[in-house]
Image (cartoon, rainbow, N blue to C red):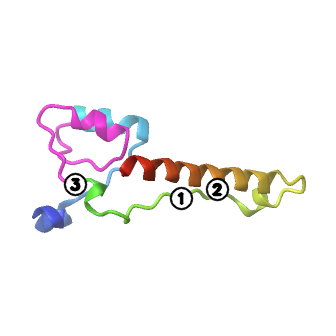
Amino acid sequence: MAMNGLESQIKRVKYVNTSDSDIAAAFLTDTSKPVVVTWKPMVSQIAKAKDVKVVFNSSQIPGEILDLLVTRTDILNRQDGSGQKFAKAIAGAWYETMSQMTVRER
């Protein structure tokens, strides 16, 4: 909000916890809620609506939005070794995905 000249409005923000599956419909059908914060793919649906303006997206602060995966230690420490196999598979998928994204950005 501050990046777009709306810093004075920050104190007026009220948080409403809404499930992912309901957020687009809740925003688009309830005009008493003038602002929404969300992510893909819901943001794409919302942005297509008439009279909607995107004020900010994370591309404006590269490197600040971090993705992560969290798992319980007991899963990783399974006696049959499946937890370590899971961790290696996820790590491999992460690096392969990042490689594909880097290729596309060039």
Q: Position of residue 69 (x, y in %)?
A: 58, 56
Residue at point 17%, 38% (across, down): 31
Question: Which of the pair 84/1 is nearer the observer?
Answer: 84
Counting residues from the start of the chain, the first of labels 1 and 2 encountered is: 1
Q: Which residue is mark 3?
A: 56
Q: Amino acid at mark 3?
A: Phe
Residue 92: x %, y % from top left: 65, 52
Badge 3 crowding class, 10 Å Cα cut-off, few under 14, some 14 to 19, many 20 or more, is few
- Identity of the residue furthest to the right in this view: 79
Q: CA distance from mark 1 to mark 3?
A: 22 Å
**Image quadrant where residue 53 sits:** top left
How crowded is the residue under tag 2: few (<14 C-alpha within 10 Å), some, or many (20+)?
Answer: few
* Amino acid type assigned to the residue bearing label 1 in the image: Leu
- Name the main secondary structure of what is drawn in magenta: loop
Q: Position of residue 54 (x, y in %)?
A: 19, 47
Tell me which label, 1 or 3, sits earlier in the chain.
3
Marks 3 and 2, the one that precedes in the sequence = 3
Q: Which residue is label 1 attached to?
A: 68
The answer to whether residue 89 shows anywhere in this view is yes
Label 1, label 2: how far apart the Cα atoms are: 11 Å
Look at the picture and state if 73 lies above or below 85: below
Q: Is residue 34 magenta?
A: yes
